[in-house]
Image (cartoon, grey):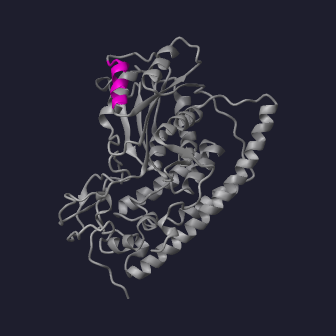
Amino acid sequence: MREWRKRSIPSPRPQNPKKGGEFTVTISQKKGDEQTTGTEPGSVIADQQKKVGTTPLPENDGKAPGHAAAEKDDRAVIQIALLLDTSGSMQGLINQARTYLWKVVNDMTLARQNGKLPAIQIALYEYGSGRLSSKDAWVRQVLPFTDDLDKVSDELFKLKTGGSEEYCGAVMDRALKELKWNTENPDALKLIFIAGNEPFNQGNVPYAPVIARGLECGITVNTIYCGSAGDGDSVLWKDGARKGDGSFLNIDHNAAPPEPETPYDAELATLNVSLNGTYLAYGFQEVRAEKLERQARQDKLTEAASPAAAAGRIAAKANKAAYRNTSWDLVDLYEEQGSRAVEELGNTGILPEELKGKSAKEVEAVVKEKAEERARLQKKIADVGRQRDTWLNKWKAEQSASGGGKANTLDDAIIQAVRRQAGRKKFSFVEENVPYENSPMNKEQ
C-alpha cells in the first residue's frame, strides 16, 4: 500500500523563491471566501493561514512542487470590474446582471490568446444606494477580483436597490485604487464596465483624471447608459467611454427578453444534479459545507430567474475555463495537478470526509473515477446544450420574423465590448469550447 508522503501543500508563492525553507497553504476558516489577485491569477488569499508542514525546496527544475507559481505566469488574463448603480430605479439592471452573468462568462471562455485559455477574474462594486454610507460616497466594494463565480452570483443576488447619490468618478476611483490589477502580463485584458443612468459628472471626484489614470495602467473604461442614447444625460457617458478608450453602450435595463422553456431544459437540470455529485470538497468542515451549499443555492436561484439563466449556468459548469474550483474541490485540483494534489493533501486532515482513512492509492482511485465521470457529464451537457441552442435560434428567428425584436440588454453590451477590445490584446475567439481543453487529464500523469 502506498503511504502518504509527509509534505505540505505548495503555496501560491514561496516567501523567497531563491531559497529553500518553509511554505504554507492558506485555507479560509471564515466561510471560505477567497480573492484572486492580478499578479497571481487563481491564487488564494485566505482569512487565516494554517501551516500544515514544512519541506526543503529542491533546486527548481521547473517541475518541483512549490515552485510552480515562482515561474513567470504567462497565462492569458481577462479582468473585468463591474460597477453597478444600485439606486432605486436600477432593479432591472441588477436582474439582468444576475440572469446574464453566465452567458457573458461563457462567451469570454471562447477567447484564446496565443492558443491559451483565459484566466477570468471578476470584481464587483455597487454605488448609489441609500443603504451605503455617505462617508464612502455611497460606494461599496462587493467583491475584489475573484475566479469564484458562485461567489459572484451569490453577491449579485444579495444586492438591493434604494435611492441615493450616484457618483461615477468616485466608484471608478475606488476600483482603480483597491483592486489588484494585473501588472505582470502586458497583454492582460483589463476592463471596467460602469452602468447607470444619472449624470456621469456627479460628485466631488472628476471622472476625467480618474479615467486618465486608468489608461496609464492599461485599464479601459466602458460606459453602459441605462436609457436612450438620445437622452441628455447620455452625453457625458459617451465622453467617459471616449476618454477611457472604451465603448459607449446604451441598454434597456428594464427589458426582460422572453426566453421560453425548451424541450432540453429538464434533461440539463438532471445532468446538473449528477454533475454536482462529482464534487469532493476539501478543507475544514465548515468550509466544505459552505462551498457545496453555495453551489446548490446558485443552481436554485438561477433556475428561478429564467430558463436562459439556468441553461447558461449549467453550460458554464461544464466548461473548465469558466467554472474552476481548485481552491476547494479535490477533483478540479487533481485535474490541474495530478497525483501530487492527492499526495500533498493526504497528510493535512482536510480531505473530504468520505476519503479520510483511505490510503493515497485508494484516494486517487476515487478522485480519478469522479474526474472521469465529470468529464463524461460535461461532454453530455455540451451536446444537449448545442441541441438547445439550435432549437432556441429557430424560435428566435420565428419571433424576429413576426416583429418581435430583442432589446439591447446588459449581456449584449458587455459581450460586444469585450470582443471588440480583446483583439487589441491578441485575443481571438473560437466557435465552441472543447471539454477539458488543455487539461492535464488529457496527458499522462
In the rendered image, residue 86, in percent from the top left (x then y), is placed at: 46, 28
Q: Looking at the image, which is closer to me, 243 or 203?
A: 243
Asked whether 71 falls inside the magenta stretch, the response is no
Q: Residue at x 52, y 71 (%)?
A: 370
Which quarter of the image is occupied by the C terminus?
A: bottom left
Q: Residue at x 41, y 82 (%)?
A: 361
Which quarter of the image is occupied by the N terminus?
A: bottom left
**Residue 358 visible, this angle:** no
Side of 30 where 87 appears, left or right: right
Main SS, magenta region, reads helix
Side of 337 where 27 appears, left or right: left
Q: Looking at the image, which is closer to me, 214 or 295?
A: 214
Residue that sits furthest to the bottom in the current view: 1
Q: Looking at the image, which is closer to me, 48 or 148?
A: 148
In the rendered image, residue 288, in percent from the top left (x then y), is placed at: 40, 61
Above or below: residue 78 compared with residue 285: above
Residues rendered magenta in the picture? 205-216
Q: Residue at x 30, y 33 (%)?
A: 177
In the rendered image, residue 267, in percent from the top left (x then y), is placed at: 69, 58
Tell me how many marks there are: 0
Location of residue 319 (image quadrant): bottom right
Location of residue 269 (image quadrant): bottom right
Above or below: residue 50 compared with residue 419: below
Above or below: residue 41 compared with residue 212: below
In the rendered image, residue 328, in percent from the top left (x then y), is placed at: 40, 60
Side of 315 where 348 appears, left or right: left
Asked whether 210 falls inside the magenta stretch, the response is yes
**Residue 31 visible, this angle:** yes
